[in-house]
Amino acid sequence: MDVYVVQHTYEDDTHEDVKFIGVFDSKERAEGAVAELRDSSGFRDYPNGFSIDLYRLNEAWWQEGFGE
């Protein structure tokens, strides 16, 4: 099963901020969540900060280990 993870990220001079928005069962629902939030306070200043990433359940996504 595939799911869609929605996040919003922005960076200013002092820090990077990442907000986890949610997990959705279709790309259309994920896009709908972005559309609802895009003009909201805190998001409207960074409308391009949204990302929608596709993940397959029951698979490990981090397999490289840590760099040295």
Image (spheres, rainbow, N blue to C red):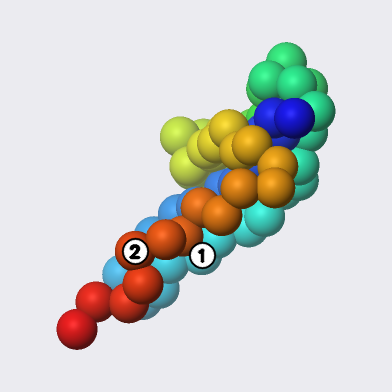
Residue in view at x 58 percent, y 33 percent: 54
* Amino acid type indicated by mark 1: Asp
Mark 2 element type: loop
The residue beneath circle 1 is: 17
Q: Which mark is residue 64?
A: 2
* Amino acid type indicated by mark 2: Glu
Residue in view at x 61 percent, y 38 percent: 55
Give the alpha-carbon distance from disc 1 to disc 2, as whole Å.
Answer: 25 Å
**Crowding at mark 1 (Cα within 10 Å: few <14, some 14-19, many 20+):** few
Q: Specify the quadrant of the image occupied by residue 3.
A: top right
Residue 9 shown left or right of residue 39 in the figure: left
Q: Nearer the viewer, residue 11 or 6?
A: 6
Residue in view at x 55 percent, y 60 percent: 18
Q: Nearer the viewer, residue 43 or 59?
A: 59
Whether residue 15 is situated above or below residue 48 in the rendered picture: below
Q: Quadrant of the C terminus?
A: bottom left
Q: Quadrant of the N terminus?
A: top right
Residue 53 shown left or right of residue 32 in the figure: left
Q: Are marks 1 and 2 in contact (CB under 8 Å)?
A: no
Q: What x and y, as percent, mark residue 15?
A: 40, 73
**Residue sticking out furthest to the left:** 68
Whether residue 54 is situated above or below residue 21 in the rendered picture: above
First in sequence: mark 1 or mark 2? 1
Q: What x and y, as percent, mark residue 67?
A: 24, 77
